[in-house]
Structure formats: structure tokens, C-alpha cells
Amino acid sequence: MSRVFNKNTIRILILVIVGLAVVLFIKYDAFMYQQPVGQVTKVERQQTTSEVDNYQNHDHQTTQLVELKILNGSNRGQKLTISNQYSDSQAMDNKYRVNQQVLLSIHTNRHKKISGTILDIKRDTVVVALIVTMIGLLIILRATGLRALLSLAVNVILFFIAVSLDVHRQGFGVLWIFGLLSLVFTAITLVLVLGWNKKTLASFLATIGGSAASLIIGMLVFTLTHNQGLHFETMEYVTQNPEPLFLAETLMGALGAVMDEATDIIVSLDQIVTANPKITSQEIWQSGKTIGQSIMGPLINVLFMIFMADTFSLMILYLRNGNGVGYAIQMNMGLGIVQSLISGIGIVLVIPIASMLASRFLKKEAINHA
């Protein structure tokens, strides 16, 4: 026991050391940037003015002098002093602090004197630290975690290929592209995580069945109501027909939740069948419904909370700028609520689908093993 504990401790220590080394390297990787990078060495706060808009929102505008040292390029080692203005809300600006690294735009006048402006904060260290932490935790889980990591990496690559294909085709057939991507996503994820067996097949069919059924129901409702109440113009940065893109987004959003529930139900039922091979198909069906009903509520609430967190800041912005609650919800949450409802339909429908498939596939597998 102590030997295993020591091996695990050594493995964790190695991961921590490697992770810290990677993060430290990224922190001091300014030499790899073509964009000028500077480090804040001194900040001097100058003046603060109070502001009130037409809707009685109070804010303060503060001016600070930021001294920086350039970390890369031909101007490396030189110092700059830049005036920066920021508000308390920092919605469209940033407050800079000592030791922060920032991306710069350097200007040289005819007298070869340099000046500059701050473009943004250099955030790669934080991003890499989060990625390294996630990868480290998955590696600690050994084979299971590595398979999950591999499936995530493959799915990310496939997603960007699908997006590139959509851009190349200028939005033509976007729903078919992401529908096929959903099939591939599901198959790769389930095979890598569960292996190639009856559980995987049942989970695949349940996921695709639940996701497709919820999307078809949504499309049918849209057709019957002539898209009434759906404001596709509120979708951000859309450069193609928004309706099929919205349906593709809905399908991808529902897929994750439905796959999670289908896998939970079928893996749990597989454990039950393994412990009690004599269990009947009807009992498997009933157990599946019970498991699904117990996780259905929390899963729908998790989806809703993720959606609320995503729209929370814009809702406050709309309300604080004199818009009514109804208009703010319509412009910020309308399409998201519809997507959440379609995902909820998929979560509900996958319970009987997964339970039925488990009662067929898992019972046959138990009989064959017996």
C-alpha cells in the first residue's frame, strides 16, 4: 500500500514540477512574440472624475500613468510611459498593475523617439495554467483520463475542420456538416471512454436518437409557428443565413447533455446487470427510468445555470441602460431559452430510449456471458 502511495506521490510531484515549468516558460516567453510585449514597472494614479449618464448610472473615470519596460524586439530594454484611462466597470478598458505584461503597439517618429499604446493584457500565462491543470488532473486518472484527453483533442480538431468547411462553403449545408460532426463526435468520445462494446453501441444510439428527436420536434414547432418570436438577428457576428446556423448550434448544445445522461444511465444499468445477471428486461427498463428521472432535474438545471451565467452581464447592461425586462430577455435570452428547452426535451426523451436499448443490449450480453 505504501509502495503504491509512494509511486502515486512521485507521479503527482513530477506532474506539478513539469506543469510549473511550462507555466513559468509561458510567463517569460515574450521573446517568441512578433508583437511588442511590455511589463508594467510603475503605475501612478493621477485623477478621477465622476460621470453620470442619462439613466443615472454612476461611474468614475480614472487616469493613470503606466511605466513599461519593453521585453522583446529591436526596442528591448527601453522604457515607455503611457497614459491610460479606465472606468470602475472596466467594460471597455483595463486598469493596469505593476508586473502585468501587456501587448503594445510601438510608434517611432522622425526623430527616432519611440512612443506606444497598450493594446491588451497578455493573458497566455493564465490560459496555459488552466490547460496544464486540466491535463494534469486527467493524467492522474491514468488510462481513463488519457482516453478522455485524447477524445477532447480529436474533437477539438474535428470541430475546427467543420468550421473551416462551413466557411469554405459559405454556410451552405451547415446543418448537415454539424449533423455529421455530431455523429463522429459521439462515436469517437464513446469508443475512447467506454471502449468498443454493447454499452458503447447503446449509448451511441441513445445519444443520437435523443438529440435527433429533440431537434426534429424543435424544427416542427418552428415551422408550425413560422418562427414567430425567434429573433435570429440577435445572434452575434453572423455572416451567413442565421436559421440553419442556430439549428446547428442547438444540435451541438443538446448533444453534450444528452450524451452525458445516456452514458450515465447505460453504465449504471451495466453495473446492475453485472451484479445480477438474472435481472429481467422489464426490471432493467424500470431501473433505467428511475436512474434517468433522478439525474434529469439536476442536468436540466445545470444547463440553465450555464446559460444564465453566459447572458448575465449583457442582461445587466441592457437593464441599466433603460430597457425593459421583456425587451432585455427577448434580445439576450430569447434564443438561448429556446435552445435550453430543446436540450431539455432531449434530456427527457433519452430516458426511455436509453432504458429500452439497455434492456435489449445489456440483457443479451449478460445471457451470452452466462
Image: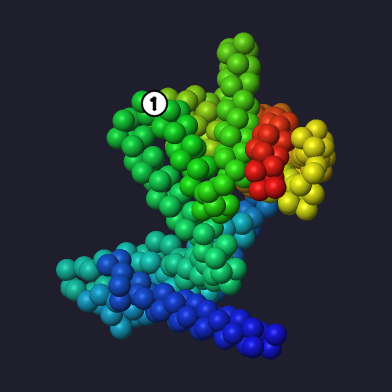
SS state under label 1? loop
Say left or right for 229 vs 125.
right
Where does the image place residue 39, in percent across and percent down from the top left?
42, 77
Label 1 Cα neighbours within 10 Å, binned few <14 / some 14-19 / many ≥20: some
> Residue at coordinates 30% horizontally, 72% vertically from top-left?
32
**Closer to the camera, 20 or 331?**
20
Q: Position of residue 354 (x, y in %)?
A: 68, 36
Name the residue at 33% across, 78% down: 71
- Mark yes or no: residue 294 visible: yes
From the image, which quarter does the N terminus lie in?
A: bottom right
Type of amino acid at the residue the image marks with label 1: Gly
The x, y position of residue 164, in whole percent, is 34, 41
Q: Does 74 appear above or below 89?
A: below
Residue lying furthest front in this view?
370
Q: Nearer the viewer, residue 91 or 207?
A: 207
Residue at image location 47% in from the left, 80% down from the top = 18
Residue 61 visible in the current orientation: no
Residue 80 falls left or right of residue 301 = left
Q: Position of residue 171 (x, y in %)?
A: 37, 29
Which residue position holds label 1?
A: 173
Rendered image quadrant of residue 140 = bottom right
Q: Is residue 164 left or right of residue 219?
A: left
- Which quadrant of the structure image shows residue 239? top left
As displayed, is residue 60 above or below residue 64? above
For the rendered model, the colour scheme is rainbow
Q: In the image, is 227 to the left or to the right of 271? A: left
**Farthest-out residue, left:** 110
Tell me the residue at 60%/43% (across/down): 198
Vertical placement of residue 276 versus 98, above or below: above
